[in-house]
Image (cartoon, helix red, strand yellow):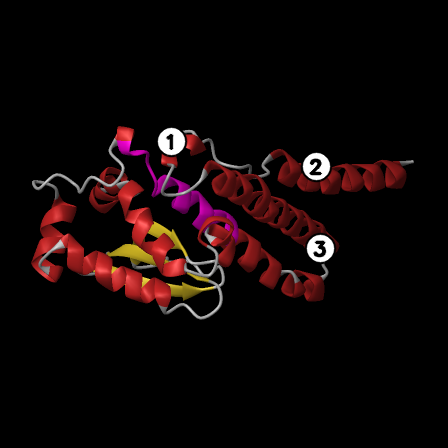
């Protein structure tokens, strides 16, 4: 009888660990604006597709990968745990980068496109390094245009020296470690093609009209 009880408790504990993953699933972030408010720079149709389909895909993917990893770990299946690492990296990066992307945007009615206050640490750092925001934006656009295939460009704070850096990443690689992302700029085709077709440089130019520099300044100070 006692062996049966122990077996049942073991099974319950395993199921509890798996259910814990289910209870802590990630979800799409709650946005502080309506997609119509980002027009005409990014159409509501494009952003709705981007958010409800593409970003949702990464939400589903990371949740599934983490649940499968929890099950494999409980089963002691090391090979399966290793096999799942790429899915975790890809979908986890896609989820995290898109969350940063939505935070990087703001309607012009909420200050989108307006440079950070001249008294802010971010403003001073950009001017000291690049001479002007126009120069920083030009270099960031060049990095975006230079992404071959799919990827991201991040404006980051180097935590080692306080520098503002333009960081290019492919697929869903993230900016992390000593790099704190302030802005995330999506160079994946799904971010622009519905509206801008193959002229992606026009998208890269337009998006600065709704960049949330105030949020970037807060991240710089954090």
- Among the two numbered marks 3 and 2 on one chain, the one whose residue lies closer to the N terminus: 2
Q: Nearer the viewer, mark 1 or mark 3?
A: 1
Q: Are marks 2 and 1 in contact (CB under 8 Å)?
A: no
User: Could you tell me if residue 99 is visible in this image?
Assistant: yes
At x 73%, y 43%, the residue is 14
As helix, strand or loop, the secondary structure at mark 2 comes to helix
Give the labeled residue for mark 1: 37
As helix, strand or loop, the secondary structure at mark 3 comes to helix
Comparing 46 with 99, the one in front is 46
At x 36%, y 69%, the residue is 146
Q: Which mark is residue 72?
A: 3
Q: Position of residue 174 (x, y in %)?
A: 42, 58
Q: Position of residue 8 (x, y in %)?
A: 83, 37
As helix, strand or loop, the secondary structure at mark 1 comes to helix
For label 3, the crowd category at 10 Å Cα-Cα, with few meaning under 14, some 14 to 19 and many 20 or more, is some
Q: Is residue 1 left or right of residue 205?
A: right
Q: Is residue 110 magenta?
A: no
Q: Which mark is residue 16?
A: 2
Q: Is residue 221 left or right of residue 152?
A: left
Comparing 91 with 139, the one in front is 139
- Among the two numbered marks 2 and 1 on one chain, the one whose residue lies closer to the N terminus: 2
Q: Which residues are magenta?
A: 94-108
Question: In the figure, 147 relative to 127: above or below?
Answer: below
User: Could you tell me if residue 181 is visible in this image?
Assistant: no
């Amino acid at each position: 009888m006692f062996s049966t009880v122990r077996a049942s408790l073991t099974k319950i504990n395993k199921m509890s660990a798996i259910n814990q993953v289910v209870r802590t699933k990630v979800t799409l972030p709650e946005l502080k604006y309506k997609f119509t408010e980002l027009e005409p720079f990014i159409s509501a149709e494009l952003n709705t597709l981007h958010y409800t389909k593409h970003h949702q895909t990464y939400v589903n993917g990371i949740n599934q990968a983490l649940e499968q990893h929890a099950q494999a770990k409980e089963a002691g299946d090391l090979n399966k745990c290793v096999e799942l690492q790429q899915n975790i990296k890809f979908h986890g990066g896609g989820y995290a980068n898109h969350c940063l992307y939505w935070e990087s945007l703001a309607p012009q009615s909420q200050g989108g496109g307006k440079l950070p206050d001249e008294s802010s640490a971010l403003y001073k750092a950009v001017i000291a390094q690049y001479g002007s925001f126009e120069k920083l934006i030009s270099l960031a656009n060049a990095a975006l245009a230079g992404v071959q295939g799919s990827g991201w460009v991040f404006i980051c704070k180097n935590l080692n020296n306080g520098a503002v850096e333009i960081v290019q990443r492919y697929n869903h690689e993230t900016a992390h470690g000593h790099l704190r992302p302030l802005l995330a700029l999506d160079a994946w085709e799904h971010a622009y093609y519905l509206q801008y077709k193959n002229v992606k440089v026009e998208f890269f130019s337009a998006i600065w009209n709704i960049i949330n520099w105030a949020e970037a300044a807060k991240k710089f100070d954090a």
